[in-house]
Image (cartoon, rainbow, N blue to C red):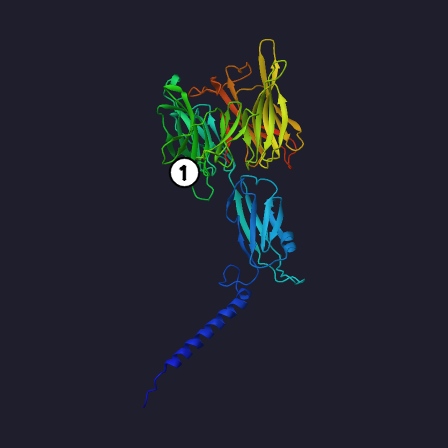
Amino acid sequence: MTMRKITYQETIDKICLFTIVICTVIIMILVIGSRVCPNDICLFRTNPHVEKFSWDDRTINSNDNAFILDFDRPVSQESVENNLEIEPALPGRISWAGKRLVYTLNNVIPYGRNYRLSLTNAQEKFRGKEELGEEIEPFIGQFQSRDKAFAYVGSDGNEAGRLILNNTTKENQTILTPENLIVTDFKFTPNTEKIVFSAAEKDINQEGVRDLSIYEVTTGLSNDGTTKIPGQLKTILGKDEYLNNNFDLAGEKGDIIVVQRIKKDDPTDFDLWKIEDGKIPQKLNTDGGNFIVTPDRNAIAIAQGEGISIVPLQKQEENESLNFLPQYGQVLTFTRDGKAAAMVNFNTDNAELRYTRSLFYVNNQGVEKELVTIEGSIVDCEFSPNGNSLFCLLTELIDTENQFQEKPYFVGIDIESEDVIPLLALPHYQDIKISIAPDGSGILFDQLITESNLNEDTVINKAPAAELFSDSAELILSSRLWVLNLPSTDSPQASLQELPIPGFKPQWSP
């Protein structure tokens, strides 16, 4: 019996035949696979479907104003628009770029809610063909907005002077700082996961109460669904030869702190410093008074002489000029996109020597609008999230027999029409702090009870565990928090709500 040798050519032929068979099987799977397989199980899918939803399983905040739906092939735009549903409803407008749908919200997303996006009964459609093709696979996506939360400084009992987080979505409250610290000011980082604050030690004498250190503490709030631990404390800037005063957060992540510092043995050494983690504190060599960080977090707006300077935080070239606004004395706030600001002009040319203040709207297109002029104070203003309105706390100057008194009141100002709408009058003014919710739903503010505004009808239930002082150095006897719910499509009238919370200096999380 003779054995036949397998030639090299025969081996190649067998390999080619095997390859052809495999490729044929793969092609058949690609053609019919999606017709015989359940959704989301098939290895190869050929039915039209949503390839990507940009907000799927994400936590959305006020900076997110649009989502994207990507399809795997051309679709009937009309059928998609007619069948796209969001629950609860989020009004918006749709635009297209090929196979991509862009949905832009009309307003900032309400906080503290879960959302469901669904698409059914939509169909594919190819260019040049009038008839519609196959149905798009049903799609469901889910996302949520950030928890609605705010922080404040407690004023009663063992909460006095401590930083407290109130999560209104989860309906819980967390004390973030230890008993030995008295918090004087604080700022949320942009992702809400930390708060940077200044505080003094409780057991020091009264002369050292302004000897502040800068700390950061975790809030327990999460943007990625993971569990975060609140109350983890870290010292950023301790007490040294300088006093630490006002501060603000800069940098994309709020990881740069700009602090106003005064040398203890030389009050003329008064400057802003830039504090970055892992770096030596850097003096900015910038003269001036009140300042705030611009919305892009790359510069500061600071009062210098008789005007406002915009000073970049990074080193600039020697021949680079600074932006200077000589006609204004104070920047109150910026719009979210940084394209406009609310500024105050202190008028000194009144013939009767009754000085007035004017509130101006100024944008980067050269528009300057005088919105109001009053004899009282322009305490603070906040833009609505879309920048179309301005909400302000003003005071009316009342001339009594013995002295001038300031009566506070809230107004809403429409930027385009310049209409000023009264919202709420308050009984007295004492260092009121205001904060507008990031979704524009309401204004959070405090009312301090001090010796100067204490009356017979005021009942003080508890004495604070520590001596707390207002920004005007008055002893705080008690305080309470309020929310002014702003007009909306559901509720066209503003309403006032007292919170059962003893505290002051409230601030919404971003």
Q: The N terminus lies in which quarter of the figure?
A: bottom left
Q: Residue at x 66, y 30 (%)?
A: 418
**Can the viewer see residue 435?**
no
In this view, the residue farthest toward the top is 401
The percent coordinates of residue 410 (x first, y second) are 60, 25
Q: Residue at x 50, y 48 (%)?
A: 57
Is residue 266 left or right of 403 when viewed as pictured? left
Q: Residue at x 56, y 34 (%)?
A: 335
Name the one closer to the observer, 285 or 225. Answer: 285
Q: What amino acid type should be assigned to the residue bearing mark 1? A: Ile
Q: In the image, is residue 114 above or below residue 194?
A: below
Q: Residues within 10 Å of mark 1 (few under 14, many from 20)?
A: few
> In this figure, what is the number of numbered marks?
1
The percent coordinates of residue 375 (x first, y second) are 61, 18
The percent coordinates of residue 330 (x first, y second) are 54, 25
Q: In the image, is residue 450 above or below residue 229?
A: above
Name the one closer to the observer, 410 or 420. Answer: 420
Q: Quadrant of residue 463?
A: top left
Q: Residue at x 58, y 15 (%)?
A: 405
In this view, the residue farthest toward the left is 1
Q: Quadrant of residue 177?
A: top left
The percent coordinates of residue 120 (x first, y second) are 60, 55
Q: In the image, is residue 252 above or below residue 455?
A: below
Residue underneath mark 1 = 229
**Can the viewer see residue 331?**
yes
Q: Mark 1: which secondary structure?
A: loop
